[in-house]
């Protein structure tokens, strides 16, 4: 198979849908020699901020002189984005080679009566095989969905990270925060340190009790300037923003870490929520340092300052200002709304929104539409888009000027046309929609 044939083969595996459990991926990995077992893994789960936290941890490890592999899902523009080493994507040829090799084992599994692994399970196996062959020092691994039931959960990591817990994927993870937290806490392994920024409430209680049960040291990351409290199994890391001067160039903050205080750190990513994610990244590499890995304070500073993570409060145009953000659930929408108020308090907003049908559409619209002068609703390019036009009806509860434009490119153009030169055009929702909009704004062909 060449690259395009290999990716088409993988995409066809989506017909197996979400089929949870570790049996299929465990059998597949056994057949290829269990490539996940020798890898030094940082396992990152949570509802929001997984990708941003992964990008920051990887950037710090790179600055410290390590080869850091990263596995993410989904990708924005190219399948190769899922597999990177120090920011360099896997080649087309290598993807084709690895999938061709895996297909032999997949065909053998099916012929012997095993269920066919899902697309994500095959992608996960590919990641482990690739990063083992490349002899990376670390694999920073993003959970796909949930935790306990996710195919990445076959690893025994150096540290487990749960960024936060809120309502998302309720059809698969449960109908309450406690249910969702229980699934996400499934990545906690016996004796393995855990880092989280989960707030007070049921989610933190679930994580804390799971850590107690598994004798796993817990590091909780919080916003504030209190003194550090500690016990053998519970420690706290505190962070503070550098002020209320919001600049689109980036933001400054400080962290009281496990090893020392990090003052006047710079982060080019925007939004207060990214400061929490960055502080989780700092706490995570501090845990690695305690395990004997050399990660200097300077590496932390340089890594954070050099972090890039597209489609997260990313500015892609100036007149009008175009801001693109993958806020695909209610908590993401709250963070985006706060960022719009922080960075553009005097500017009017034109919202371009496209969401999958299984998301918290009404809540997202209720959070973002009141901040907008006009709303353009569009359809994500996904079978899960559902009745995308009902978003327009939701938006009309809060704003009079509402458009429904099926084509994403045309929806972006409509938003630009409606906006004045000094307005902000905010393009947000499903990553499927955001990716297409971003390609158009960057002038790519699609």
Image: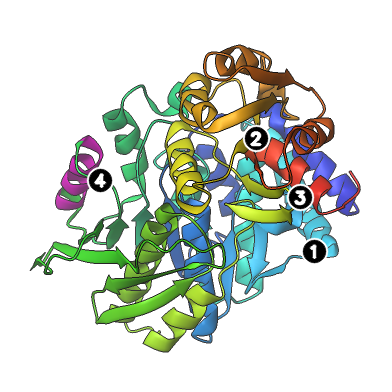
Give yes or no for contact between labels 1 and 3 (Cβ–Cβ under 8 Å). no
Label 4 neighbour load within 10 Å: few <14, some 14-19, many 20+: some
Is residue 312 among the parts visible in the rendering? yes
| Residue drawn at point x = 16 percent, y = 45 percent | 209
To which residue does mark 1 refer?
Answer: 94
To which residue does mark 3 refer?
Answer: 77
Q: Is residue 209 magenta?
A: yes
Secondary element under disc 3, as helix, strand or loop, is loop
Calculate the distance from the C-alpha at mark 4 to the C-alpha at mark 2.
32 Å
Along the polypeptide, which appears first: circle 3 or circle 4? 3
Q: Quick one: quadrant of the C terminus? A: top right
Left or right: 151 with respect to 222? right
Give yes or no for contact between labels 2 and 3 (Cβ–Cβ under 8 Å). no
To which residue does mark 2 refer?
Answer: 350
Q: Give the residues drawn in magenta, as a range.
A: 202-212
Placement of 348 over or under 438, stated as above or below: above
Calculate the distance from the C-alpha at mark 4 to the C-alpha at mark 1.
41 Å
Q: Quadrant of residue 256?
A: bottom left
Left or right: 4 with respect to 297? right
Give yes or no for contact between labels 1 and 2 (Cβ–Cβ under 8 Å). no
| Residue drawn at point x = 78 percent, y = 58 percent | 95
Secondary element under disc 4, as helix, strand or loop, is loop
Calculate the distance from the C-alpha at mark 1 to the C-alpha at mark 2.
42 Å
Q: Which mark is residue 199?
A: 4
Along the polypeptide, which appears first: circle 4 or circle 2? 4
Label 1 neighbour load within 10 Å: few <14, some 14-19, many 20+: some
| Residue drawn at point x = 46 percent, y = 45 percent | 341
């Amino acid at each position: 198979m060449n690259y395009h044939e290999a990716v088409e083969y993988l995409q066809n595996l989506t017909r197996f849908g979400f089929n949870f459990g570790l049996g299929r991926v465990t059998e597949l990995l056994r057949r290829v020699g269990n490539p996940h077992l020798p890898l030094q893994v940082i396992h990152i789960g949570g509802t929001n901020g997984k990708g941003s936290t992964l990008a920051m941890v990887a950037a710090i490890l790179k600055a410290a002189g390590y080869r850091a592999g990263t596995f993410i899902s989904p990708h924005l523009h190219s399948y190769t984005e899922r597999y990177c080493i120090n920011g360099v994507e896997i080649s087309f040829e290598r993807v084709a080679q690895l999938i061709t090799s895996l297909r032999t084992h997949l065909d053998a599994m099916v012929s012997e009566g095993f269920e066919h692994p899902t697309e994500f399970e095959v992608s996960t196996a590919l990641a482990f095989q690739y990063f083992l062959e490349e002899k990376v020092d670390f694999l920073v691994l993003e959970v796909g969905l949930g935790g306990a039931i996710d195919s990445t959960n076959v690893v025994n990591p150096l540290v487990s990270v749960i960024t936060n817990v809120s309502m998302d994927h309720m059809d698969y993870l449960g109908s309450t925060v406690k249910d969702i937290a229980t699934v996400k806490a499934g990545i906690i392994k016996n004796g393995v340190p855990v880092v989280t920024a989960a707030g007070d409430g049921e989610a933190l209680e679930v994580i804390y009790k799971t850590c107690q049960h598994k004798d796993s040291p817990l590091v909780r990351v919080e916003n504030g300037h209190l003194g550090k409290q500690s016990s053998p199994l519970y420690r706290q890391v505190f962070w503070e923003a550098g002020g209320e001067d919001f600049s689109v160039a980036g933001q400054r903050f400080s962290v009281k870490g496990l090893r020392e205080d990090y003052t006047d750190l710079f982060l080019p990513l925007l939004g207060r929520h990214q400061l929490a994610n960055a502080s989780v990244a700092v706490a995570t590499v501090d845990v690695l340092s305690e395990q004997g890995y050399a990660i200097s304070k300077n590496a932390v500073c340089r890594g954070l300052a050099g972090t890039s993570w597209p489609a997260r409060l990313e500015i892609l145009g100036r007149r009008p200002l175009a801001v693109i953000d993958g806020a695909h659930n209610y908590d993401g929408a709250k963070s985006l709304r706060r960022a719009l108020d922080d960075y553009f308090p005097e500017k009017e907003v034109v919202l371009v929104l496209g969401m999958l049908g299984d998301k918290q559409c009404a809540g997202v619209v209720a959070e973002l539409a009141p901040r907008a002068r006009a709303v353009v609703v569009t359809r994500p390019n996904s079978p899960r888009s559902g009745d995308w036009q009902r978003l327009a009806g939701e938006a009309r509860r809060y704003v009079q000027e509402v458009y429904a434009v099926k084509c994403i490119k045309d929806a972006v153009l409509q938003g630009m046309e409606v906006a004045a030169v000094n307005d902000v055009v905010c393009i947000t929702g499903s990553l499927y929609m955001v990716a297409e909009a971003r390609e158009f704004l960057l002038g790519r062909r699609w």
